Image (cartoon, rainbow, N blue to C red):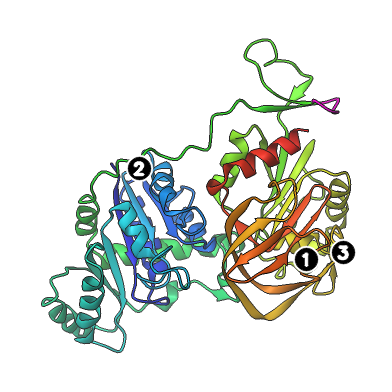
Amino acid sequence: MVARLVIAAPASGSGKTTVTTGLMAAFTGAGLTVSPHKVGPDYIDPGYHSLATGRPGRNLDAYMCGPELVAPLFAHGARGCDLAVVEGVMGLYDGASGLGELASTAQVAKLLRAPVVLVVDASSQSRSVAALVHGFVSWDPEVRVGGVILNKVGSDRHEALLREAMEDVGVPVLGALRRAPQVDTPSRHLGLVPVAERRTDAVDAVAAIGEQVRQGCDLEGLLALARTAPPLGVEAWEPGTIQPLRRSESGGPGAEHPVREGAERGRSSARRPVIAVAGGSAFTFSYAENTELLTAAGAEVVTFDPLKDEQLPPDTDGLVIGGGFPEVYAAELSANERLRKAVAELARSGAPVAAECAGLLYLARSLDGQPMCGVLDADARMSGRLTLGYREAVAVRDNSLAAAGTRLRGHEFHRTVIEPGAGADPAWGLVHPERRFEGFVQGGVHASYLHTHWAARPEVAHRFAGACAR
């Protein structure tokens, strides 16, 4: 039993992220252990959630992971916490395009049996707020809107008018926040600037937002509402308890084997396969469950920063390069020639390399004219066009992540293009909502624009860790 709230809004731009992050900071500051969650595939907002709570921000995506995994993944992240706060995506009832309520905040709220707090941008309206809220409350009787937070309120008089109008709706006002541009967080071409790129400023901004929410919201009322959520009655998701794999120092066929209790545990001739995971300011996009799955599959996961580290971690057997903003740091990444050569050498050796989006660009020959690792015979550049949306994909051939024919769902989100868009052996055949080949498979390398959540297909992590162990 975890007290929980879903923070939603009528539309994007209403202030969900600011209010959610502020609530997380305020409740954490009050001494509660808060579990942060985000509906949908977004990587950036969870970074601010993590900063506010001191815990990993976790995503709940009913499209990529399936509705059946939403509650178990929530229970996994919220284990041992006093309160869970879930930030919604887009408008409350907006889901995956053309698929009804799938992946919407409303669907996740129902799956979690959680009360919803609606954040309403009250600027430029007064009594109309009541009509807006009434519409959202009555649209789906299974969604329980338990309170409203009025955002961007202009004055005491404005607040009084809004509260008076809300009295007829029967939904309590649990907060009223003034316009406060001094705590706004900066944005650029893909949304908010990630925490990792502005650590000091982000800490100050989160603290200011938390104080604003503490002063403007009824924290006791919000916590009381959260505690009305009934037990979920599900088993928490587990990344797995398989025995760790070991990689023989001598290598060769048959080097991969499960550890046996006792005699082999202390042998220096065997070790866990080391998987290096790119991090730092240029590579900030990752799902916590992916790393947890690799660890459960027997790998030793070590983070490195391609902007600073000139070598891969010692004894690296495999490499994961996730999403982020390499286009912002193209010159700096290019200048780290020693690491680029080390990555290229590892890839040429046949070692498993999994690259998503930013990782794809980093493995290319060039990015906006700057030399990259040169693993792929392709060039990337910034584009004025945003590519955004869910994708259903199938593995075209056997590779380090998936057997041929494996189907999964992912998400694309970028303003870059790579030419060609697919290699002679593509990473994926996209089958919905459009049909095309995408990405590259060569040797142990799997590089693609597609972001994937491995909790939906744990065998992906196990296959990759096993390939690293070999």
Question: Which secondary structure lies at badge 1?
Answer: loop
Crowding near the residue tagged with mark 1, few <14, some 14–19, many ≥20 C-alpha atoms within 10 Å:
many
Compared with residue 266, is residue 193 higher up or lower down, i.e. above or below?
below
Label 2: which residue? 81
Q: CA distance from mark 3 to mark 1?
A: 10 Å
Position of residue 29 in the picture relative to residue 361 (left or right) = left
| Amino acid at pointer 2 | Cys
| Amino acid at pointer 1 | Ala
Question: Which secondary structure lies at badge 3?
Answer: loop
Label 1: which residue? 422
Q: Are marks 3 and 2 in contact (CB under 8 Å)?
A: no
Q: Nearer the viewer, residue 242 or 342?
A: 242
Residue 110 figure quarter: bottom left
**Which x, y percent locates residue 396?**
72, 56
Q: Earlier in the sequence, mark 3 or mark 2?
A: 2
Q: Earlier in the sequence, mark 3 or mark 1?
A: 3
Most extreme residue toward the top, as rendered?
263
Compared with residue 12, is residue 124 higher up or lower down, i.e. above or below?
below
Q: Earlier in the sequence, mark 1 or mark 2?
A: 2
| Amino acid at pointer 3 | Asp
State the residue at coordinates (11%, 76%).
167
**Which x, y percent locates residue 52?**
43, 55
Label 3: which residue? 377
